[in-house]
Every structure is written in structure tokens, then in C-alpha cells.
Amino acid sequence: MVDIVAHRSLNDWYTNYELSMSSNLNHKNIVSVFKICVNKAERIIINRHYANGSLGKHLSDPTSLTWMQRLHICVGVADALEYIHYDAFEDEYIIHNNVNSSKVLLDHNWEPKLHGFRSTSKVKKHHLDLTNSFYGKLEYKDPAYEKTRGFKHQMRRRRLTCD
């Protein structure tokens, strides 16, 4: 038996984009779509239920997560980001644009799952992608983005482990 949660959404461009993006991603630390029900006006998206909710609800309570759990979550999110930046597509990479604690869900084993691919950008690898639109929250922008107003794929990989 699988615990599920269903979300009703309009059949709009953003929903279709998020569904097409997340349905093409296959990584243990990324939320995958379980099932989609479609009619003309709306879509019902069915995902697995993540028993421990979002990371955000646990960060304000210092006793909610141990430091080892926090480190394990950080490494899992880093693995998911490495996947979308380097491995998800051969000629393109994905910029999430809105990574924050509410976009990380925790399953019953406290394994992190990145979600919320509604405002992502797909960029050609090894090209400067100039853009006038930034979809993430404006509290922080990468200084390289501020300088060039574009994204460029950089081949810098680091291996993180949590033992």
C-alpha cells in the first residue's frame, strides 16, 4: 500500500511545465509524479505522501532534527541539485530558481525530496543563457547572475558523503 496526496490544479501553462519537468526527472532525492488525472479545466496530480512534511517546519525547533539528520538532509539536497545541474539531461541543465526549506519534503526515513519545479529554467550546457527574468525569490541572487544577467554551466563537481 502507498500513502498518497492529491493536489487539484488548473490546467495552465505553469502546471503543465512543472509536470513535464518533474516527470522527466528520476532521482531518489526528487519528488516524482505518481499519477495524473486530466480533464479540460483542471488536473489532479497524485504524489506519494511524505510523512514528515517539509523541512521548513522542523528547522525552527532545535530538538526536531539531530545534527546528523540535518547533515544527511543537506547531502541529499546537494545530490538532487547535482543531478539537475549535471546529469538529468545530456545537453541541458536545470536551474531550480527557488530552493528553500519549503521545497524539501521529508519521507518517513527523513530522506529529503526536492520538489517545486514550477519556476525552473532549462539552459544549454556550455553556453551563456541571457535572460531578463529571474523566477526565484529576490532575497538572494548569485553575484555571477547579477553581473552577466545570464546563466552559464560550470563543470565544478564535488562529492559529498555523510557517514
Image: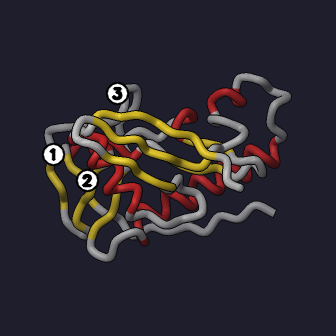
- Numbered mark located on residue 151 in the image: 2
Question: Label 3 vs label 2: CA separation?
Answer: 16 Å
Estimate how packed mark 1 is, as few (under 14), some (14 to 19) or many (20 or more) residues with alpha carbons within 10 Å. Answer: few
Out of 102 and 32, give the one closest to the viewer. 32
Q: Is residue 72 above or below residue 137?
A: below
The earlier-in-sequence mark between 3 and 2 is 3
Residue annotated with mark 1: 131
Q: Looking at the image, which is closer to me, 46 or 123? A: 46
Q: Helix, strand or loop at disc 3?
A: loop
Q: CA distance from mark 2 to mark 1?
A: 8 Å
The residue depicted at 66 percent of the width and 35 percent of the height is 53
Q: Which numbered disc flags the more N-terminal residue, 1 or 3?
A: 1
- Mark 3 and 2 residues: CB-CB less than 8 Å, in contact? no
Pointer 2 local density, CA inside 10 Å: few below 14, some 14–19, many at least 20: many
Amino acid, disc 3:
Leu
Where residue 143 sits: x, y (%)?
Answer: 33, 41
Specify which label sits upstream in the sequence, 2 or 1: 1
Q: Position of residue 18 (x, y in %)?
A: 34, 48
Q: Residue at x 78, y 46 (%)?
A: 69
The structure residue drawn at horizontal position 42% and vertical position 61%, both measured from the top left corner, is 84
The answer to whether the residues at label 2 and label 1 have Cβ atoms under 8 Å apart is yes
Badge 3 density bin: few <14, some 14–19, many ≥20, Cα 10 Å: few
Locate the C terminus by quadrant. Answer: bottom right
Kind of residue indicated by mark 1: Thr
